[in-house]
Amino acid sequence: MIFTRTGILRGARQALPLVIGTVPFGLVVGVISDARGLSLAETLLMCALVFAGSAQLLALDLWADPAPVLGAAIAAFAVNIRMAPMGAALAPWLDRLRGWRLWGTLATLVDHSYALAVADQQRGGRDAGYLLGVGACLWLFWMVSVGIGYVMGTMVRLAPGHPLYFTATATFCAILVPLWKGVRRDLLPWLAAGAVALLLWRLGAGPPWPLIAGALAGATLGAALDERRAKGALR
């Protein structure tokens, strides 16, 4: 395994086409950040340190005065727990990195950079700088697009209940589409998660507890079904 400047630049170049899909997402985060009362500095600091569009939208959707810091942090953790298996899959590269190379790579790791890095590994790639290059390029354009979105938001104030606030929910619904493999029984954990979350919401539980309870219910049912299938296959 190596880590070179050439690999970083190659990753940055190959990440450029992905910017087309992330810029509109960043614009929405910027507009909603302004509507929620965050300053431009606060918005950019959040994006620089978090760099997770889905988690940021979720936190902004929960934002209130006073801010539910603990609730938003727990909800963001639940959304981003998927990063753990990504790191394990990239261990052949990450395990040999140290210092700024390791922390910079982890800080900019997102779904897009993970997918490109895995594909590069499968082609025999050995340059871990490629992963940092992809992530750094996406991070840079993410900061720019969020900043532009914030400025646009200051020009057009969103009224309470504006359809743009539905973006967070729509984003998570869209994420589910490529995850479904066409097997009907795989829908059961999703339905269970939605039913539990909706039930708690109707009972008056405030955010993010319906989301967390629904996620745990769906994950538990999914794990139980997988274990049942595994036992059936062994027989």
Image (tube, rainbow, N blue to C red):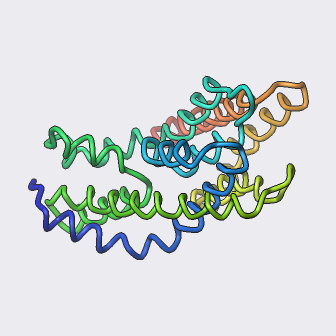
> Is 207 on the left-hand or right-hand side of 162?
left
Task: Please name the residue shown 37% across and 46% down the image.
Answer: 86
Q: Nearer the viewer, residue 108 or 220?
A: 108
Task: Please name the residue shown 63% across and 43% down the image.
Answer: 38
* Position in image of residue 227 (x %, y %): 53, 34
Q: Is residue 226 above or below residue 71?
A: below
> Is 109 on the left-hand or right-hand side of 11?
right
Q: Is residue 133 above or below residue 52?
A: below
Instruction: Please tell me in which quadrant of the rendered image residue 115 appears.
Output: bottom left
Q: Nearer the viewer, residue 99 or 89?
A: 99
Q: Nearer the viewer, residue 111 or 85?
A: 111
Task: Please name the residue shown 53% across and 39% down the image.
Answer: 232
Q: Is residue 72 above or below residue 86?
A: above
Q: Nearer the viewer, residue 41 or 27?
A: 41
Task: Please name the residue shown 73% across and 50% down the image.
Answer: 35
* Position in image of residue 228 (x %, y %): 57, 35
Instruction: Please tell me in which quadrant of the rendered image residue 189 appears.
Output: top right
Instruction: Please tell me in which quadrant of the rendered image residue 171 appears.
Output: bottom right
* Position in image of residue 154 (x %, y %): 69, 58
* Position in image of residue 131 (x %, y %): 27, 57
> Is 119 on the left-hand or right-hand side of 123?
right
**Number of disc labels:** 0
